[in-house]
Amino acid sequence: MRGRVTELRRLVRHHAELYHRQDAPEIPDADYDTLVAELRGLEERHPELAEPDSPTATVGAPPSGLFAPVAHDVPMMSLDNAFDLEELRAWAARATSRLDGPAGPYVCELKFDGLAISVRYEGGRLVRAATRGDGRVGEDVTHNVATIGDVPPRLGAGAPEVLEVRGEVYMAIPAFERLNAAREAAGEARYANPRNTAAGSLRQKDPAVTAQRELSWWCYQLGTVVGGPTFARHSETLEFLADLGLPINDAWRRIEDLAAVETYVLRAEQQRHAQDYETDGVVVKVDDFGRQAELGVTSHHPRWAVAYKFPPEERSTRLREIQVSIGGKGKATPFAVLKPVFVGGSTVQMATLHNEDQVRAKDVRPGDIVVVRKAGDVIPEVLRPVLSERPEGLPEWVFPEVCPCPNRAPLVREEGDAAHHCRHPHCPAQQAGGIEHFASRGAMDIEGLGEKNVRLLIREGLIVDVADVYALEEADVVSLENFGPKKARNLVAGIAASKERSLARLLFGLNIRHLGGAVGELLAGAFEDLDSVIAAPADQLAEVPGVGPTIAASVRAFFDDEDNLAVVAKLRAAGVNFAGPVPADTDDALPATLEGKAVVVTGTLENYSREAATAAITARGGRSPGSVSGSTTAVVAGAAPGASKLTRAENLGVPILDESAFEHLLATGELPSAAAPEGTG
Ligand code: IVH
């Protein structure tokens, strides 16, 4: 017991030092909070182990010596945390029981994720700014704070003789993205997150460096006032500070009772990604100063306020192994197999690692404890290893040389390509992806032929290539697991119906490298039938507007391959439609799935040039404007997308689609439900 308490104190001190002093935390805030909660629990149950200098009794970290010390007139305290509504209710119940009457009304404010500073004005002019430090003594960062545009050098009329206010310095997400983009362009490492970047930017010896960083400030608390009005309530002070020209975030509300506070908290949690700055919770404060005084403070936090913390979007967990999944076009994508961890509202056990360079840049190794992030609807991501927990001698991961399928064909990475590919023409891993793609909604749209069934049919030896699908009979599948007469009948009917699909869909379904749905349409529109596409030399293919030499070469290579021609022959024998659209039929071939919809495209797509993407959208009755607005249906993001478009989409709640979701949208006019992580198959 004593040993664990000592260990926990060491860990908490270590991580507090990294967070407060070095602005470089190693573990997620939620993991830190868990350590503190365990320590606090043990100290409460074993008062004999309490120590006055335990990290549970202190705030932040003492000044570093880099800056001149500043003693705070009124201590800058921390806040008590509530991790769910029950803890919030318990806090309110404790407060109410200490008072004669109710603790409400309350003021609810967003909890900004940055670093606390105190700013002092004398005669309406900024004279000093200090960090929180250990709560009693902070660091003098006046010259740095003076460079922040949101911090007025002078206050408006009616400023008290002395006014000390507190607030949070933060970096807005677009500013953070701009800074990281510039760093990447200069070959420098990206910063981890806006909070630490803001803290590091503020604690610079040279104010010119701070001035280059786009920092912002929200003011949320009155400190010392001399020669000014007196106030009865916190809400009055917020109005007063706003009138003086200080930046008060307008999400704050004065709220009568706890039930309404809970509604506020849940709404703020739902909308936490709607702003362009990060929040990690809601601060609930007792509004009435008389009641605040009655409630008083502990050594660590006031009893009249509490921080409701949003569920964490970052947690650490064990990286069990790194596997590689093979996509329909043979692309080998590494992904992390994790010890399941609950983060961002769901249990995560796999996360894409994108490609070899990403694994190397992040330096994550099988066996590491890694930080996993899952925010909003974005797919889970492995951020970094927790180096202090890395077992000694843990080897680096090397990209497998061969495909995980039984052929063990080499995984090749061509020059200028970030991805490895298996180029084996009969790779079963690739085959499964290829057949899934053939049957998918944007291609031949065969109901009942999804990932699971494709794998099952391959395993049972019933299909090897896409053409084998047309040889399936009810009797072949009826007794397979999860089938039965009805599903077998539906599958075979769905397969038969797919024979009538358009040439464009068939071309797309064949899974030819670089040939996306839009190029399928361009080719189908330019040639009479599949046979004339097969017969066309590369330069004739390349002449089709929107096609070009790369796609043409790849189409040529596909149809020069004997195995592929054999598949085509089987498709013909099965009676699959090879004919291009009869002019009168073009409307049928392209349903107006995007009628009245606006789809913005940003970044580089794999299978669509920008013109091809626009053509695909407009051919379906949609528009493709250059900028994101409230009426945008979706933003399609390829590689290196425009950061401002993405941020705007996030702020406006416009869904962001990857390329496969885009194809789904083109085919159906519907937005897919949240995208599944890549590489989970
Ligand atoms: S009030 C004694 N209000 O959260 C109460 N703090 O975890 C003083 N914070 O140190 C704090 N947003 O850095 C308050 N609206 C808000 C806040 C806020 C962010 C930070 C602040 C504080 C920390 C406590």
Image (cartoon, rainbow, N blue to C red):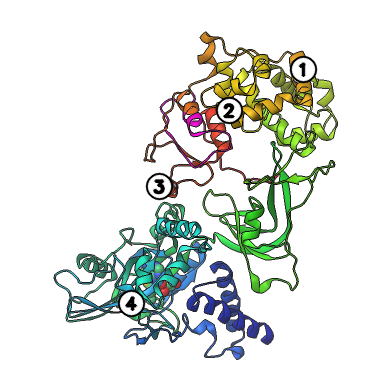
Residue shown at the point (45%, 67%) measured from the top left: 197
Magenta stretch: give its range. Answer: 593-614
* Ligand 1 occupies quarter: bottom left
Q: Quadrant of the C terminus?
A: top right
Residue shown at the point (23%, 72%) measured from the top left: 153
The answer to whether mark 4 and mark 3 are in CB contact below 8 A is no
Q: Position of residue 244 (x, y in %)?
A: 20, 68
* Marking on residue 517: 2
144 vs 432: above or below: below
Label 4 belongs to which residue? 118
* Marking on residue 569: 1
Do we see residue 393 in this rendering?
yes
Distance from label 4 to label 3 (Cα)? 32 Å
Distance from label 2 to label 1 (Cα)? 22 Å
Residue shown at the point (31%, 78%) measured from the top left: 142
In terms of sequence position, does the residue under pointer 1 or pointer 3 come before the other? Answer: 1
The answer to whether mark 1 and mark 3 are in CB contact below 8 A is no
Looking at numbered disc 4 in the image, what kind of residue is underneath it? Ser
Q: Nearer the viewer, mark 4 or mark 1?
A: 1
In terms of sequence position, does the residue under pointer 2 or pointer 1 come before the other? Answer: 2
Q: Nearer the viewer, mark 4 or mark 3?
A: 3
